[in-house]
Amino acid sequence: MTLKAGFIGTGGISAKHLNAMKAMKDKVEIKALCDVSEDAARARAQEYGGNVYTDYKKMLDEDLDIAFICVPPDSHGDIEVQCAEKGLHMLVEKPVNLYLEDAIKANEAIKKAGVITSVGYLAGYNNVDLAVKKFLDGKTIGMIVSERWGGVPGDENHWWRVMDRSGGMLHEQATHQLNTMRYYAGDVVEVYKRDALRINKELPNHTVPDCEIVTLYFKSGAIGYITTTCTMINGGGWGRMDIIVEGHMRIQPGRNDLKVIPDGAADIVVSDEPVLDLDQSFIEAIIIGDRSLVIDNYENGLKTAAITLAANESARINKPVSVYQP
Ligand SMILES: NC(=O)c1ccc[n+]([C@@H]2O[C@H](COP(=O)([O-])OP(=O)(O)OC[C@H]3O[C@@H](n4cnc5c(N)ncnc54)[C@H](O)[C@@H]3O)[C@@H](O)[C@H]2O)c1
């Protein structure tokens, strides 16, 4: 079976998925590429093949099986609804949308169509995450915290630094860490965020907060927080996650390893067996018809986006805000 794939948005992240599909060319044909910038779509077509479009609705007239949706947070419009109505399986890049109502509509259309979806989060597609998740199963988490501190991607014309386009660092970037926190600790029901823009004010067109701190209340009763800053434009970025868990210990999952503190408090074995990555899991799920291979489907992506959108609203009104639950 060869799945025919179309891409909507052929900028930076599309290359990762295009390379992954090229590596699976016995399973996937790159059939169509769409970008509102014809040059962007043509450049990718030269490298990967496929018909070029500037209007995704026209692209959807092609005979396709799957769509990769790789547009900025404010640009999803009704792309997912249209793809669902055409019966296309979808890999949607995170965050799923800047507008909660549009994401809710997309989720409903997806559920109605019964298509398989995946969101571009990486949590759970590696052995460290799997081992920690297994260890935490059934245990009481007291608190989970994370930091994502970095710089500002792109130049002064980039959508990332504009709050009305990206939703800010928490919604656009630290959404990865927050999704991982949700993967470990479950759903978040309420948030309270404070933010500031004091240091990056000197950068042109920069309207996203440069420091954010969010208190998180989980459905389980656990609490947590996440902080971000994009002030580290000259280097000095940093990140961490810490989970305070029953047994009086801390677990720090890293990218390739994990730490249990104090030493020896628990023995968490990390397998070295190969695991399917995000793209492979999505394609295998479709081919064998097993959606459980996908860790975060669209509804999970919606849950994570709902947390950061509620956090932004909380900062705006300076009050705790309940998180939408699908
Ligand atoms: N999973 C990850 O680790 C990861 C990494 C980078 C980016 N992303 C996400 O991927 C998304 C895109 O990021 P990027 O870095 O590729 O951005 P980008 O600006 O490089 O590319 C986005 C492309 O989408 C096009 N586009 C916008 N609206 C469109 C529409 N209606 N139809 C067709 N094309 C349209 C733009 O012209 C642009 O070429 C963002 O949501 C970002 O958060 C995820």
Image: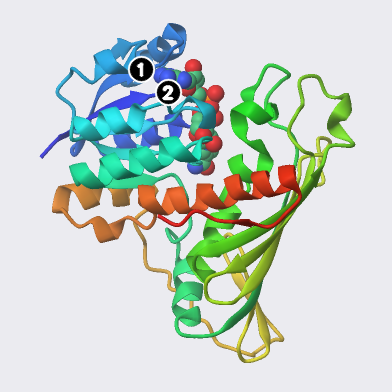
Colouring mode (rainbow / by chain / secondary structure / one colour): rainbow
Front-most of 102 and 52?
A: 102
Residue 111 appears in the picture as rendered: yes
Residue corresponding to mark 2: 9
Residue corresponding to mark 1: 34
Q: CB of residue at label 2: within 8 Å of ligand 1?
A: yes
Q: CB of residue at label 1: within 8 Å of ligand 1?
A: yes
In the image, is residue 2 above or below residue 75?
A: below
Left or right, 209 with reference to 107: right
Residue at point 16% right, 48% down?
Answer: 287
In the image, is residue 90 above or below residue 82?
A: below
Check disc 2 and report its element: helix, strand or loop. loop
Q: Which mark is residue 65?
A: none
Residue at point 60% right, 55% down?
Answer: 177
Label 1 crowding class (10 Å Cα cut-off): few <14, some 14-19, many 20+?
Answer: many
* Quadrant hosting residue 88: top left
Residue 194 location in percent, x, y?
Answer: 78, 50
Residue at point 45% right, 38% down?
Answer: 101
Q: Amino acid at mark 2?
A: Gly
